[in-house]
Image (cartoon, helix red, strand yellow):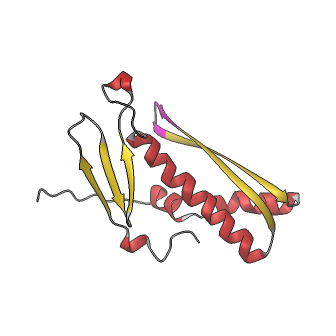
Amino acid sequence: MCCLNQMANANVLITSQPEKYKTVITASGHTLLGDEPVSEGGADTGPNPYEYFLSSLGLCTAITLRMYADRKEWKLDKVTVELELNKTEAGNEIKRRVSVSGELDEEQKNRLLKIANSCPVHKILNAPLAIFTELS
């Protein structure tokens, strides 16, 4: 589904800026800004790291559902994904609410809900993940 061919080739460059927490994100020729809210000492010039983290899951979910519906030739008009990250006693949890609109019956909607859990980012987050950090 979403991004499968690009997953192994994903590459992002993050560069801090002189303005405290403002950060430039460069990915595939696109430039985005990240920052912290004013309440945390930033200037709120872009989403914070947690919002970008959730955005990757939401983006992958929406694209995966669109791709699936397109392959099935279903009349899916719109996908909306709302995400919330919460700390719990057991760790962290993500609440994901998916809304779909279009000429879809209940069976199709239920299938799309199951497909949401098949997006590659969801799979990465549910699998063991190693992060290797080096100073260059």
Asked whether 121 falls inside the magenta stretch, the response is no
| Quadrant in the rendering for residue 114 | bottom right
Identify the residue at image location x=60%, y=58%: 61
State the image coordinates of residue 89 (x, y, percent, origin top left).
46, 30
On the rendered structure, is 109 left or right of 80? right
On the question of residue 117 being in view, the answer is no
Identify the residue at image location x=73%, y=61%: 112
On the rendered structure, is 29 left or right of 60? left
Whether 102 is drawn above or below 83: the answer is: below
Locate the C terminus by quadrant: bottom left
| Quadrant in the rendering for residue 66 | bottom right
> In this picture, which residue range is highlighted in magenta?
85-92
Identify the residue at image location x=73%, y=73%: 70
Which is more toward the observer, 101 or 24? Answer: 24
Count of picture labels: 0
Of all residues shown, which one is farthest toward the left?
A: 136
State the image coordinates of residue 58 (x, y, percent, origin top left).
56, 52
Most common secondary structure along the magenta stretch = strand
State the image coordinates of residue 49 (x, y, percent, origin top left).
38, 42
On the question of residue 54 being in view, the answer is yes
State the image coordinates of residue 68 (x, y, percent, origin top left).
69, 70
Asked whether 86 falls inside the magenta stretch, the response is yes
Whether 92 is drawn above or below 9: the answer is: above
